[in-house]
Amino acid sequence: MVLFILLLLFIGLAVTMAWFLISHDRGEKEPVLALWQAAGLGFLGAIAGAIIESKLSLGSGLTPGGPHGSMFTSAITIGLVEETCKFLPLALLIYKRRYFNELTDGVIYFALAGLGFGLPENMLYTLVFGTQAGMIRLVLTPFFHAATTGMIGYFLVRQKLHRKSPFVVVLPFMAAVVLHGLYDFGLASGIGYFQLVSLAITLGLSIGLFLLYQKATAEDLEQGRSSIGHNDFCRSCGFVNPQHHLYCTHCGQHA
């Protein structure tokens, strides 16, 4: 019974997070199919990541009590594999899509990919290792994968909109990999203060996801990409836009 409740809680938290991000979007309504694709690619990324980690035997390197050097290397490698599997497929699919055009989109789509990745992982760990492992992950990791990928997604769409250097994306990606690796290493180390660092990382990232989404929403509003902004006239054709639509109803261009 407890196991069943834990699984329902994981599903409920993921659905609640997805609902929050989508319902609080103040820009152009996102295509439903694209949202499902983002979550689906995250799910497929979890499968791909598990296969790669199994082939490379990365999990064995995180055995508690092992040499810290090899544990750290394994943890960073796992971070690199998982962040790549979550981020890259969706980035390749969505980058040039017209609807990927707001800073909030970077958080929404990539957080959904993170949820699609993290939900099956959390449920699998709970089924394999039992309710105690499930309760620990319920506290530590319900939004961990969504937070790391959502952070990278924000910088990806920022790079697209402002035509910035690719390093705008590379640096946050590497930061996510390092944080992911430090988190895994801290938990596997069995050392109290390292585990506290892991706790601080996952809580900080989860809180940071909401703060980043708030920041992206404010920036979209300030830069006229929000449907509640002050774009009273279309910037493309000058036609009046009293309803503050994100796209002009007269010329179809970005208002």
Image (cartoon, rainbow, N blue to C red):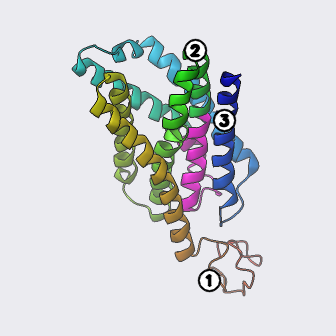
Residue matched to label 2: 128
In-image side of 237 versus 222 (left or right)? right
Label number found at residue 9 = 3
Pointer 3 with pointer 1, Cβ within 8 A: no
Q: Distance between the residues labelled 3 and 1?
A: 40 Å
Tell me residue 168's x, y (percent).
37, 54
Q: Which residue is drawn at 43% across and 41% down?
A: 202
* Residue topped by disc 1: 230
Is 216 placed above or below 167 here?
below
Q: Specify the segment rendered in magenta.
A: 90-116
Residue 134 x, y percent position in the rendering: 56, 26
Residue 65 in percent (x, y) is at 28, 14
Q: Quadrant of the C terminus?
A: bottom right
Query: Which SS class for mark 3?
Result: helix
Q: Are dots 2 and 3 in contact, CB under 8 Å?
A: no
Disc with the residue nearer the chain's start (2 vs 3):
3
Q: Is residue 93 magenta?
A: yes
- Residue flagged by tag 1: what amino acid is it? His
Distance (Cα) linking label 2 and label 1 = 53 Å
Of labels 2 and 1, earlier in sequence is 2
